[in-house]
Image (cartoon, rainbow, N blue to C red):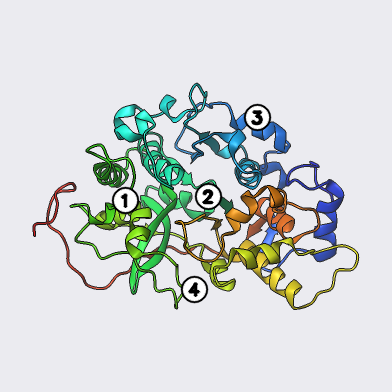
Amino acid sequence: MAFPATAMSGLPESAVTSLVTKFGIPPGLRLVDPYKLDLRNDDEIGAWLRKPHPITSDKNVWAFWHAGYTNMPPWVQRNVINWVRRLGPEWTVHLLDKVPGSETNVSRFVESSYFPDAFNNGTMDGPNVGPHSGDLVRLPLLWKYGGVWIDAGTFLFRSIDDICWKEIEDPASPYEMAGFTLEMRPGVECMLNGFIAAKRGNPFIRRWHDIYMALWSGGVTNAQGFHNHPLLRHLPLLCPPVDKFNCPNLGTMMETFSDYLAAFMCFERLRKLVDPAPGDVLLQQQTNWSGARQFELLTAKRTGEGVVKDEKWQAAEKFVTDALAHTSTMKLSHGPAGALDSFLADLWDSEEHREKDNMEATFAAYLRYGSVHFDQTREMVPIKMGWPTEEVLTCGVLEPKEV
């Protein structure tokens, strides 16, 4: 079987054809109709991403990289390029930045009143300026224009329409917002903010942002101490049950961890949400949350001369096919400083490994190929968030709990 474009997934046509004809299509997957894809090559899509595009509907994908497209690590560029390729003309991907004079600067899309002084004046500091800038940007974009926010470090394995958008658009559906959840305390789920979907004008989105903005008021320049803010201090610290997720000790104080993920806690203050899809931690659990192990599996050769289908090959095959067939996204995070032993995102960021996410004949290249060309056959079944019986606050959105 041949495909109509030679650079759709960063692989030459011969390699793409070989992958499918030699190994077939894994269970739970089918080929995407190539006519639904954006068939431009990487350079063409990359140039397109650096330009602003009209907003003609709610079918927008929003992403942000503080320093702009040209300063993104290559593996992150390829993530966003593949969103464009996979989603085709049905969706418009907008990659925004905070580069002075940039045509895609977020200030061209969202008024400064939506952001704190530290963001507007460029005085944010600390180790997480980029991630926390993204936390401030995502909700106003969804409020004003609608669509889906996706963190740039995310592989997309399924059509957004199938993940959640059909339900959100359906007037007979009860679902108005979608995302992924993770157990952030034993028995307590919290919505992650790396994937958020909602139509424009969603009141929950606006209130969520209002709470997060309140944390940054009063000249604050970084997230230190957010867990103890009057709007959040009644909430226990985030403390994921690491044993349940086959995760080693996070290696960081829970206060620091909670500050880093304060946007999650702002959601928890409001939480009234249905999550339409499984989370993306399955693959992390398989590899004991080790970026080094994930790197080892993905750099292994899948095809070619001398390949032996040993235990490592089998583990890599399972890792990749499970990702493609059983998860909607795979978010690669750098995480708070000092957490865990290694992060795949850090390894791929390094000069030494900048092309390892897409090397021909490796499992990483196959993962990239499959994220564009394979469609899942499993049905998406909405699930309701769950948490144990606990205190309910009766107060305004920005009103602290009385102590």
In the image, residue 181 sits, relative to residue 368, either above or below, namely below
Q: Nearer the viewer, mark 1 or mark 3?
A: 1
Instruction: Assess whether mark 3 and mark 1 are in contact (beta carbons under 8 angstroms).
Output: no
Q: At which x and y percent is residue 216? A: 28, 41
Mark closer to the chain start, 4 or 3? 3
Real-space Cα distance between discs 1 and 4?
A: 24 Å
Query: Taking 371 as reference, is 188 left or right?
Result: left
Real-space Cα distance between discs 1 and 3?
A: 37 Å
Q: Amino acid at mark 4?
A: Pro
Determine the residue positioned at 44% across, 56% down: 336
Mark closer to the chain start, 1 or 4? 1
Residue designated by label 2: 160
Residue designated by label 3: 47
Query: Taking 147 as reference, is 215 left or right?
Result: left
Q: For mark 3, give the secondary structure.
A: helix
Q: At which x and y percent is residue 198? A: 39, 45
Q: Amino acid at mark 3?
A: Ala
Mark closer to the chain start, 1 or 2? 2
Residue designated by label 4: 248
Can residue 385 be seen here? The reply is no
Query: Taking 44 as reference, is 83 left or right?
Result: left
Real-space Cα distance between discs 1 and 2?
A: 34 Å
Q: Amino acid at mark 2?
A: Ile
Residue designated by label 1: 224
Mark closer to the chain start, 1 or 3? 3
Q: Nearer the viewer, mark 1 or mark 2?
A: 1
